[in-house]
Image (cartoon, grey):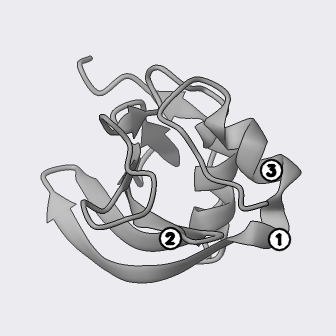
């Protein structure tokens, strides 16, 4: 039976519990004022999508506005992007992805502040 992610809380935990099904590739980065947007493509079993992780270098934290979502042509697409602001379990996944880029995350910051 195939497994897939849904756009609800604890998605990060589901990925961590099935880490062998999750893979990702760094796509690029973009400077956003004082922050840097790291873009990744990911795959989870037959599902595919993207992660946009906003990183603030001077504090080594990622924004709570960082998101995980599916591509429109993915099997089992999300109804909406899943943000770190409403699923704190994504922090562990985003930290793994950033560590692969040589960046250690030191927590989350609120994008609005």
Q: Which SS class for mark 3?
A: helix
| Residue at left offset 26%, top offset 17% | 113
Residue 74 location, x and y as percent? 37, 65
Q: Mark 3 sits on what residue?
A: 16
Q: CA distance from mark 3 to mark 2?
A: 14 Å
The residue that label 1 is drawn on is: 20
Q: Is residue 71 above or below residue 60?
A: below
Relative to 69, is 99 above or below?
below
Q: Which residue is mark 2?
A: 42
Residue in the picture at 83% in, 71% down: 20
What is the residue that sits farthest to the left in this orientation? Answer: 33
Q: Are marks 3 and 2 in contact (CB under 8 Å)?
A: no
Of the two numbered discs 2 and 1 on the same chain, state the one appearing first in sequence: 1
Front residue of 26 and 32: 26
Image spot of residue 53 (x, y percent): 40, 53
Question: Label 2 to label 1, Cα distance in Å?
Answer: 13 Å
Query: How busy is the neighbourhood of tag 1: few (under 14 within 10 Å), some, or many (20 plus)?
Result: few
Residue farthest to the front, as pictured: 1
For label 2, count other residues whose C-alpha is less than 10 Å away and answer few (under 14), some (14-19) or many (20+).
Answer: many
What kind of element bears circle 1? helix
Q: Nearer the viewer, residue 22 or 60?
A: 22
Whichever of callouts 3 and 2 sits on the residue coming sooner in the sequence is 3
Give the percent coordinates (x, y) of residue 84: 47, 32
Q: Is residue 41 left or right of residue 12?
A: left
Residue 99 in the figure: left or right of residue 19 = left
* Mark 2 residue element: strand
């Amino acid at each position: 039976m195939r497994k897939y992610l849904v756009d609800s809380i604890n998605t990060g935990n589901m990925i961590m519990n099935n880490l062998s099904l999750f893979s990702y590739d760094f796509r690029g980065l973009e400077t956003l004022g004082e922050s840097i947007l790291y873009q990744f493509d990911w795959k989870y079993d037959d599902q595919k999508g993207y992660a946009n992780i906003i990183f603030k270098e001077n504090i080594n934290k990622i924004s709570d506005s960082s998101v995980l979502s599916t591509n429109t042509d993915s099997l089992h697409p999300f109804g909406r992007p899943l943000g770190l602001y409403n699923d704190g379990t994504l922090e562990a996944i985003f930290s793994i992805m950033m560590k692969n880029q040589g960046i250690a995350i030191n927590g989350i910051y609120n994008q609005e502040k």
